[in-house]
Image: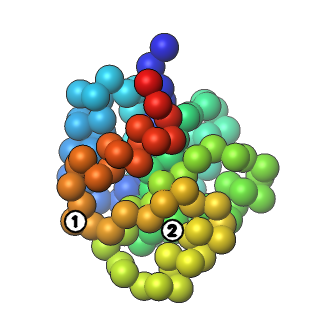
């Protein structure tokens, strides 16, 4: 059975590009453009991993993580961000993020984390 990944990214090109690359790696991928839509999607379906951006309109990555954990979800979350703000990084870890990867990143770097979290 394919592992399922939810990508939460407001930039359409980054979202679609990442979804395409992960699909090629044999993952089942869904995408949404912000944390609010991600929370809705997670109520509808189960995922093995969420990959979320931090800086997004409506509900950003930190708000999303906070609401997700308050809802009792323990789904693993990997944060990607172009903003190297140390406080945001610490907040993400405090809210249960597995890791933070800074943009631009190498796809291999992302895959190393994903394979660690959802092997096979």
Tell me the residue at 42%/72% (across/down): 55
Q: Is residue 24 above or below residue 85?
A: above
Query: Compared to 1, does 92 lie above or below?
Result: below
Residue 48 in view, yes or no = yes
Q: Which residue does the numbered mark 1 point to in the structure image?
A: 104
Residue 26: % across, % down: 32, 23
- Residue at 69% x, 61% y: name it: 67
Q: In the image shown, does 53 or 78 lie closer to the viewer?
A: 78
Q: Is residue 112 left or right of residue 68?
A: left
Q: Please say if 48 is above or below 95.
A: above
Badge number at residue 78: none
Q: Residue at x 47, y 85 (%)?
A: 86
> Quarter-wise, where is residue 10 in the image?
bottom left
Disc 1: CA contacts within 10 A as few (<14), some (14-19) or many (>=20) = few
Circle 1: element type: loop
Residue at coordinates 24% horizontally, 47% vertically from top-left?
108
Query: Is the Cβ of the residue at disc 1 closer than 8 Å to that at disc 2?
Result: no
In the rendered picture of this protein, how many numbered marks are placed on residues? Answer: 2
Q: Estimate the x, y position of residue 70 in percent, counting from the top left.
A: 77, 59
Q: Position of residue 35 (x, y in %)?
A: 53, 58
Q: Within 10 angstroms of label 2, few (less than 14), some, or many (20 or more) residues? A: many
In what quadrant of the picture does the C terminus appear? top left
Badge 2 is on which residue? 60
Left or right for 5, reference 82: right
Mark pair 1, 2: CA separation: 19 Å
Marks 1 and 2, the one that precedes in the sequence: 2
- The answer to which of 80 and 111 lies nearer the viewer is 111
**Residue 100 pos. (x, y %):** 44, 65
């Amino acid at each position: 059975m394919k592992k399922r990944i939810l990508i939460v990214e407001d930039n359409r090109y980054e979202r679609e590009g990442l979804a395409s690359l992960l699909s090629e790696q044999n993952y089942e991928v869904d995408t949404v453009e912000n944390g609010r839509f991600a929370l809705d999607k997670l109520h509808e379906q189960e995922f093995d991993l969420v990959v979320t951006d931090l800086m997004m309109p409506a509900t950003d990555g930190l708000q999303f993580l906070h609401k997700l954990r308050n809802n009792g979800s323990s789904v693993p979350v990997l944060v990607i961000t172009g903003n190297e703000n140390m406080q945001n990084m610490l907040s993400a870890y405090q809210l249960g993020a597995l890791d933070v990867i800074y943009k631009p990143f190498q796809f291999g770097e992302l895959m190393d984390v994903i394979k660690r979290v959802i092997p096979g």
